[in-house]
Image: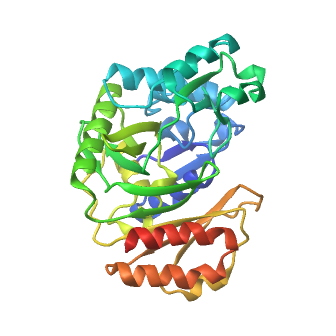
């Protein structure tokens, strides 16, 4: 099989490499500053763990590579303006929004979108960075460089957040995991819960929307779609053209992980529907040193990224799954004392979802 070069050498590239090993697929996560001649790129399929990148000798060379899968899709989805325009062109439900070009727009923005405005950087910005929640009296706090470089959305009163992770083959076949319920705190995903049998109406709506997006783009590989749950159904929040944090539970909770599924898709290998037979929970480890006492809980699978621990930085995650939701909830509660206090609310939320 062809090797796979992954543009970006963070935890997603690392987990793609790990997923390739049992299949005999050589996966090379590469930093943006790598020397092009150091890689077996001419024989490789190229993918990416990031949506946008600076121009370097490597990225200039890869931009011409005939096997760079989704190369022209990444910049379209990395810019929230063109991403929103795509969703609108497909008639898919999303929060009302507009480009924020200048401060003189604010009266019209609040008249059109309501009392809470969510400002988002067009590019970059993730895990709560590059976003501002503003009311009419707070617009003076927005940095001036945001104007022309941000969109503004209506603040949505949602009852929950879910994501759909799916994959599309080169022939247009699509497969999906069950919807994942997500809890964000300070803009960072803290905890995810997935069930083998999701809400049928929500699952069907989400699959229709993500299929339409991937088909329109001719996308190949794994894509994630984050949504708000509102009384009318689902509103698309954002798209990620790659493997996604909210799909990490699939490493231990599905017959095929999202990482293996992505490799299968880009290499044109069989793409069966992954089997999910038990509830799963993923707990993000954020700015927390490793604690081997977590392993005393027999349901815990530790995935440690070997990164320097810094405040607000994702350094690993814990996966737990069990056919009995009660046993899974008990394992989470047993884990709570072994984690810093700030994890308690996220675990309590997951236990509530399992009840």
Q: Where in the figure is residue 345, as x and y percent of width and height?
A: 58, 68
The answer to whether residue 75 shows anywhere in this view is no
Looking at the image, which is closer to me, 150 or 251? 150
User: Image quarter for residue 272?
Assistant: bottom left
Colouring chosen for the image of the structure: rainbow
Looking at the image, which is closer to me, 249 or 192? 192
**Which residue is at 49% across, 40% downward?**
47
Left/right placement of residue 23 relative to residue 47 reads: left
For the C terminus, the image quarter is: bottom left
Q: From this view, report whether residue 24 is shown above or below residue 8.
A: below
User: Image quarter for residue 260?
Assistant: bottom left
Q: Where in the figure is residue 176, as x and y percent of width and height?
A: 29, 50
Q: How many marks?
A: 0
Q: From this view, report whether residue 13 is shown above or below residue 67.
A: below
Looking at the image, which is closer to me, 103 or 29? 103
**Which residue is at 71% across, 28% downward?**
137
Q: Where in the figure is residue 109, as x and y percent of width and height?
A: 56, 19
Q: From this view, report whether residue 297 is shown above or below residue 287.
A: below
**Which residue is at 44% across, 32% downward?**
67
Left/right placement of residue 219 relative to residue 175 reads: right
Q: From this view, report whether residue 317 is shown above or below residue 93.
A: below
Q: Where in the figure is residue 338, as x and y percent of width and height?
A: 65, 82
The answer to whether residue 147 shows anywhere in this view is yes
User: Image quarter for residue 140?
Assistant: top right
């Amino acid at each position: 099989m062809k090797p796979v070069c992954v543009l970006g050498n963070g935890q997603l590239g690392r987990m793609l490499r790990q997923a390739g090993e049992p299949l005999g697929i050589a996966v090379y996560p590469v930093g943006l500053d790598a020397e092009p001649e150091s890689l077996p790129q001419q024989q490789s399929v190229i993918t990416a763990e990031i949506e946008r990148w600076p121009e370097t000798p490597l990225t200039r060379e890869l931009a011409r590579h005939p096997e760079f899968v989704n190369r022209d899709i990444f910049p379209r989805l990395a810019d929230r303006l063109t991403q929103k325009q795509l969703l609108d062109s497909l008639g898919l439900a999303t929060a009302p929004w507009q480009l924020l070009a200048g401060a003189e727009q604010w009266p019209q923005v609040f008249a059109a979108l309501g009392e809470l405005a969510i400002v988002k950087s067009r590019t970059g910005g993730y895990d709560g960075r590059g976003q501002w929640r503003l009311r009419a009296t707070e617009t003076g706090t927005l940095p001036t460089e945001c104007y022309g470089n941000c969109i503004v959305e209506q603040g949505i009163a949602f009852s929950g957040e879910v994501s759909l992770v799916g994959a599309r083959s080169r022939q247009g076949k699509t497969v999906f995991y069950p919807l994942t319920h997500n809890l964000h705190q300070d803009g960072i995903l803290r905890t995810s819960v997935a069930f083998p049998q999701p809400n049928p109406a929500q699952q069907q709506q989400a699959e229709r929307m993500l299929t339409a997006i991937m088909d329109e783009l001719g996308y190949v590989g794994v894509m994630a779609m984050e949504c708000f749950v509102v009384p009318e159904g689902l509103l698309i929040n954002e798209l990620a053209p790659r493997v996604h944090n909210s799909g990490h539970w699939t490493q231990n909770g599905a017959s095929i992980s999202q990482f293996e599924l992505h490799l299968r898709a880009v290499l044109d290998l069989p793409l069966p529907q992954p089997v999910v037979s038990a509830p799963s929970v993923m707990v993000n480890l954020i700015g927390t040193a490793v604690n081997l006492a977590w392993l005393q809980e027999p349901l815990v699978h530790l995935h440690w990224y070997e990164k320097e621990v810094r405040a607000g930085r994702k350094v690993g995650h814990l996966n737990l799954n069990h056919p009995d939701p009660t046993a899974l909830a008990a394992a989470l509660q047993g884990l709570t004392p072994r984690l810093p206090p700030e994890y308690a609310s996220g675990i309590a939320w997951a236990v509530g979802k399992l009840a």
